[in-house]
Amino acid sequence: MVTQERLVEAIETDRLIARHDGNGAEVDYAVVVNHISKTFSRGRFLDKYRKPNPKAKPPVHAVNDISFAVTRNEIFGVLGANGSGKSTLIRMMSTLLIPDAGRIEIFGFDVQRDEKIVKTLINRVSVEAAFFKKLSPTENLLYALRLYGHSGAGMRREITEMLNRFGIKPDRAVKPMEQLSRGMQQKVAIARALLTSPVLLLLDEPTTGLDPRSKKEVQKFVHDLRDEHDATIILCSHDMAEAEALCDRIAILDKGKMIALDTVDGLKDTVAGALHDPNPSLEDVFIYLTGREIDEEADNDEDRDEE
């Protein structure tokens, strides 16, 4: 468990992180992100056998000194335009990328030092879900459950019930993944994550490619996972309505930096005066703080991370 005192000491005086009862009581943190940075070089890495390339593009500062903490059982949102650093941040949390600076702890375990333990605590759903494409949804989910230590005759029944909830009928559940649509594959990816009941679920644009009904089903399952399995969830999304419906707090990223962190109501209150609107939308908040639409890509290559 990470105490508030330890967090303050580690993160120094970052006012965006404080989340406690005001009396010095312990706060049970699921995730602590401490001054994390990640830069990608693009052709400027030189060794003794290579000459400088004057046409090389400058490095991309995908994540630039970001700090925050997520309490246990919280649904925490991350909003940002393409290239803001959302996916890079999620990949560092899930041990897929090594930070250049800073530290991330998952339930007190360091993602680099305690990588094997961290992997047992998390599951990740991304826009591009990885599968064994020659295997069926049922076979992929059986493999995932066994990988997470599940066994027994009831696994196939659990899988069938979960796939049915997403509208994946038995005839499609036995077809190779490569024969399913992009949206159908994403449903299987979400089903896989929910079946393994992770204590930390990382959702990177999970409902991209899904129809409105399926989006609502996923949102309900996210709430159910939090309420029934004591899970903590971090959601990266372009969908303002989805973020507002699901998230207890939201961090807004722009060009690799975190520029705001608060509840939805808190974010709206922050900009209401400047916009002369007592009830601005979350999209209004985002545009005011970043100067861009949520679906607008970075205006130059330097603003884009390696997504």
Image (cartoon, rainbow, N blue to C red):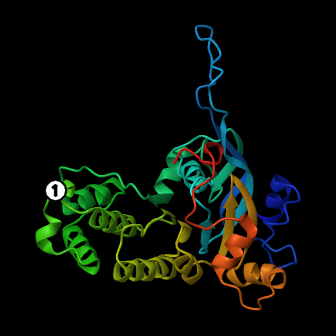
Image vertical order of residue 101 relative to residue 286, above or below: above
Looking at the picture, how far across and down is residue 134, in whole percent?
18, 49
Which residue is located at x 88 percent, y 78 percent?
23
Looking at the picture, how far across and down is residue 168, in whole percent?
21, 74
**Which one is nearer the viewer's eye here, 171 or 283?**
283
Looking at the picture, how far across and down is residue 223, in whole percent?
49, 81
Q: Mark 1 points at which residue?
A: 176
Task: Inspect this view and state whether residue 2 appears.
Answer: no
Looking at the picture, how far across and down is residue 31, in whole percent?
64, 61
Looking at the rendered structure, the secondary structure element under dot 1 is loop
**Which one is nearer the viewer's eye here, 2 or 250?**
250
Which residue is located at x 79 percent, y 59 percent?
7
Quarter-wise, where is residue 149 in the image? bottom left
191 sits to left or right of 283? left
Residue sitting at the far bottom:
278
**Label 1 crowd (10 A; few <14 / some 14-19 / many >=20):** some
Image vertical order of residue 195 relative to residue 14, above or below: below
Quarter-wise, where is residue 249 in the image? bottom right
Quadrant in the picture for the N terminus = bottom right
**Which one is nearer the viewer's eye here, 41 or 67?**
41
Given the image, on which type of amino acid does mark 1 rest? Answer: Pro
Image vertical order of residue 131 relative to residue 59, above or below: below
**Which one is nearer the viewer's eye here, 7 or 253?**
253
Quarter-wise, where is residue 232 in the image? bottom right
